[in-house]
Image (cartoon, grey):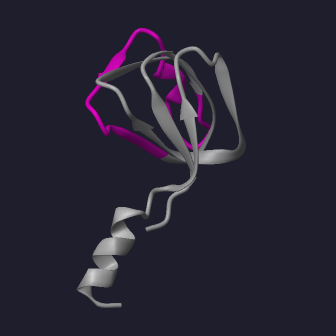
Amino acid sequence: MDGGDRAGYMQICGAVDSVFITDTMGVCSATDPWTDLSLLTAAVVFTGMTAPGLKNSSKIDSETTYTGYGAKWQCSKITAVTVKAGHIIAHTKVLL
């Protein structure tokens, strides 16, 4: 693999087994645990998150607004998320 091949590979590396989640969907549960959440809007407000792979995930709730297009949350296992405002994408697999 040369530099050009690697650059093309890296551009699509996160686009595998994804789920689009909006604030109108209620609680979204993973059929396979998610490993990555990416923010698609200017901000997101979580009502709740179940993430056995993320210490203190119970502290991520509706009291905090997270901002920044492309912000990411990554851990070994995220099993459920509820979004009060904003849109995110959840990835089941992230290839590196």
Q: Residue at x 57, y 26 (%)?
A: 49
| Picture mark count | 0
Q: Residue at x 58, y 14 (%)?
A: 24
Q: Residue at x 45, y 46 (%)?
A: 74
Indicate the position of residue 43 as horizontal and vertical percent values: 32, 21
Q: Nearer the viewer, residue 6 or 31?
A: 6
Q: Quadrant of residue 19?
A: top right
Residue 59 part of the magenta-drawn span: yes
Position above or below: 63 against 95 = above
Q: Quadrant of residue 10?
A: bottom left
Q: Which residues are magenta?
A: 50-74
Q: Residue furthest top?
A: 63
Residue placed furthest toward the right: 31
Prevalent SS, magenta region: loop
| Left or right of residue 91, residue 3 in this image | left
Q: Is residue 32 on the magenta stretch?
A: no
Q: From the image, which quarter does the N terminus lie in?
A: bottom left
The residue that appears at 34% across and 26% down in the rendered structure is 41
Q: Nearer the viewer, residue 61 or 83?
A: 83
Where is residue 51 shown, x and y percent of the image? 59, 35
Image position, residue 61 (x, y; %): 48, 16
Determine the residue located farthest toward the bottom in the rendered image: 1
Residue 45 at what x, y percent from top left? 42, 16
Q: Quadrant of the C terminus?
A: bottom left
